[in-house]
Image (tube, grey):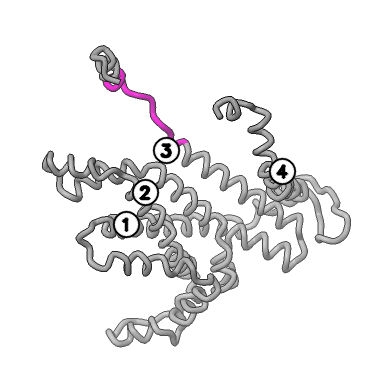
């Protein structure tokens, strides 16, 4: 078996189908997007090369700035909401003394399996000027608002809807990560006099480093690629206050037939996602051992302990 696994040709042959699918459905389309972003193209006729005109036009519009700000707001809201609540809920569920653990586990995940369209329409009905939320506020003499019609609140509200629906996915990942931590660690911490909170701060959260890294990549890149909720709930409005680069791409390509301009926005979005992933990988990189740790390892080796 070791001889087989050490055969580079065999490994390549096993990887070839997946590699071919990736190249055909992912790599080649990305290259085509980048190529056509330098052209004037309506999606039907022959594309005409225009150099950097699409990028100059893109960077010169106020919508581009608004879209990037909205992406940052969207990513920040869903990242904080999902990761904080998912961690709290997963830690709560991990305690065997928590009653109704099975019900809570299912309840947290139910929104994830619902259709995005259904969830958005549900929240549109709740957030409407005559919707449920304003009726509840009226009972407490609160001031109702047109939540999706306010250009300052719309992006926050839309981000909340996305965070509410997909928090259960982050919860499932973190909950699985907690289950993989040996219970002996927590028992040793209790013997040393640690409280539950201290145990989770010193053991659970540090050992979930790789899980948090994956969750962070999902939530931040999800904020950059945000589109569906804007398209269904606000249509990019009011005005262009809920535009993102994805919505700019959609509007330019499929509403105005400016595919070259839309693909320029798509290229910038891909580059931003790549930068974010590289930054997250850098932040979560394995740091080299300190001098004290190296000295401790040498001491252990001298004692004959592996």
The verdict on residue 291 being magenta is: yes
The answer to which of marks 3 and 4 sits earlier in the sequence is 4
User: Judging from the image, what secondary structure is the residue with disc 1 in?
Assistant: helix
Front tag of 3 and 4: 4
Give the extent of the magenta segment: 282-294
User: Label 3, label 2: how many angstroms apart (C-alpha)?
Assistant: 16 Å
Q: Residue at x 88, y 59 (%)?
A: 45
Give how far apart the Cα atoms at labels 3 and 1 are: 22 Å
Whether the residues at callouts 1 and 2 have beta carbons within 8 Å, the answer is: yes
| Camera-nearest label, 3 or 2 | 2
Q: Classify mark 3: helix, strand or loop.
A: loop
Return the residue at label 2. Answer: 177
Quarter holding the C terminus is top left
**Label 3 – label 4 distance at C-alpha:** 31 Å
Label 3: which residue?
284
The x, y position of residue 190, in whole percent, is 15, 44
Which residue was labeled with disc 1?
Answer: 90
């Amino acid at each position: 078996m070791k001889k087989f696994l050490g055969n580079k040709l065999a490994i390549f042959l096993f990887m070839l189908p997946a590699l071919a699918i990736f190249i055909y459905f992912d790599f080649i389309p990305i290259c085509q997007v980048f190529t056509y972003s330098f052209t004037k193209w309506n999606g039907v006729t022959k594309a005409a090369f225009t150099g950097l005109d699409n990028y100059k036009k893109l960077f010169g519009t106020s919508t581009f700035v608004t879209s990037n700000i909205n992406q940052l707001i969207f990513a920040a809201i869903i990242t904080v909401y999902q990761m904080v609540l998912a961690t709290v809920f997963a830690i709560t569920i991990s305690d065997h003394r928590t009653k109704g653990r099975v019900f809570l586990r299912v309840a947290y995940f139910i929104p994830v399996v619902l259709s995005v369209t259904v969830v958005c329409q549900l929240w549109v009905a709740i957030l409407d000027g005559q919707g449920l939320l304003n009726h509840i506020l009226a009972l407490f003499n609160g001031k109702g608002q047109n939540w999706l019609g306010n250009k300052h609140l719309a992006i926050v509200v839309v981000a909340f809807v996305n965070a509410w629906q997909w928090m259960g996915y982050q919860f499932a990942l973190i909950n699985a990560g907690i289950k993989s931590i040996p219970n002996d660690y927590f028992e040793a911490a209790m013997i040393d006099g640690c409280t539950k909170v201290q145990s989770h701060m010193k053991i659970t959260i540090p050992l979930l480093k790789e899980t948090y890294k994956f969750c962070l990549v999902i939530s931040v890149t999800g904020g950059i690629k945000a589109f569906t909720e804007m398209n269904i709930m606000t249509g990019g409005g009011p005005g262009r206050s809920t535009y993102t680069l994805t919505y700019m791409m959609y509007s330019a390509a499929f509403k105005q037939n400016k595919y070259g301009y839309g693909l320029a926005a798509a290229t910038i979005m891909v580059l931003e996602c790549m930068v974010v992933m590289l930054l997250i990988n850098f932040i979560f990189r394995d740091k080299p051992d300190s001098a004290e740790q190296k000295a401790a390892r040498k001491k252990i080796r001298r004692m004959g302990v592996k």
